[in-house]
Amino acid sequence: MLNKFAEELKAARLKSDITLEQIAAKTRIDLKFLEAIENGNFHFLPELYVKAFLREYFNIVGLDEQISFKKFDAAKKGKQYDELGNTEDDQKKIKPEKEEPKIKQQPTPPSIPAYEMREAAGQPAERSSKIDKKNMMIAAIAGGVVIIFLIIYFVFIKGSSEIVVAEKPYSEVQQDNSQRFTQEAPTRQTTDSTFAASSDSLSLVLETNDTSWVRFLLDGSRTEEFTLLPHATKEIKTLKNYQIIVGNSAAVQFNLNNKNLNFTGNKHEVKYISVDSSGLKYLTTPLNF
């Protein structure tokens, strides 16, 4: 059903005379995600992001968002959803109206206790008692499993402070983390002896005008990595020095202890730099950490 739903999306796009490249340019959704959607693959990201991409797709190609999402939810369950809002199960329930012959209602016979019915059918009362005991044992086992699960949850899971999964916001997922680094030719080295770093701490502040990815090696022992959105500010402190890989280097500026380092780069280009109390140095050998 998901493949059929994907074919309907593609047909609507072709009818609107819109290409996948045009949708990618308008929505900033990576082209490979759009291709996966039209191929019936809706598991490339968590459903939260997939639905966000679908909403953009529906609006671009002119599909009704509410009906399209109902079709998507029905397709995930392997069901067909029609324009009237009925799934296959609902359609099976719809039958042609036919006038039923009226049947004279007979008086309801008095109810007979269950044990009398069992005895009348030749079933001993002891067998019913065994069935009731078996059902009670099953219910007791199920209850025990639930109690054990709750104990494990509250003791080992809920009490833990470790974050097991942290999903990024939708705007960060739109940025393709598959940028390929290009090796940089030797470039100029900038130093400034006027930087007055304290004897035990350096403060490096990053400011961005576009989305960028940055990875740090602090004092040669600790690594940190960030995806920064446009107009973001991030402060990183260390004792002696930083080694830095900067993706989309044109989007980032560095300030060391309130002094601008005059860092320069090109759009979508990767830069490798080193920063200490003496200033900023451009590295000709790619960093790997």
Image (cartoon, rainbow, N blue to C red):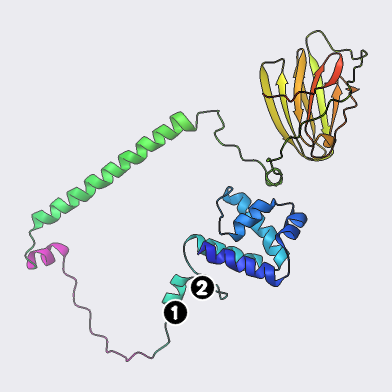
259 drawn magenta = no
Task: Indicate the position of residue 94 as horizontal and vertical percent values.
Answer: 44, 79
What residue did someone put label 1 on? 94
Q: Quadrant of residue 8?
A: bottom right
Secondary structure under tag 2 reads loop
Task: Indicate the position of residue 182 as horizontal and vertical percent values.
Answer: 76, 34
Instruction: Classify residue 74 as left or right of residue 239.
Output: left
Regarding residue 70, the answer to whether it shows in the image is no
Secondary structure under tag 1 reads loop
Q: Quadrant of the C terminus?
A: top right
Outermost residue toward the top in this view: 199
The residue segment tinted magenta is 99-120
Nearer to me, 143 or 233 = 233
| Most frequent secondary structure within the magenta stretch | loop
Instruction: Classify residue 69 as left or right of residue 157.
Output: right
User: CB atoms at circles 2 and 1 under 8 Å apart?
Assistant: yes
As drawn, 231 above or below 5? above
Instruction: Classify residue 6 as left or right of residue 107.
Output: right
Label 2 neighbourhood size at 10 Å, few (<14), some (14-19), many (20+)? some
- Using the numbered discs, state the Cα–Cα distance from disc 2 to disc 1 in whole angstroms: 10 Å
Regarding residue 56, the answer to whether it shows in the image is yes
Q: Quadrant of residue 224?
A: top right
Name the residue at 22% across, 82% down: 107
Task: Say what amino acid the circle numbered 2 marks.
Answer: Asn
What residue did someone put label 2 on? 86
Name the residue at 55% across, 51% down: 43
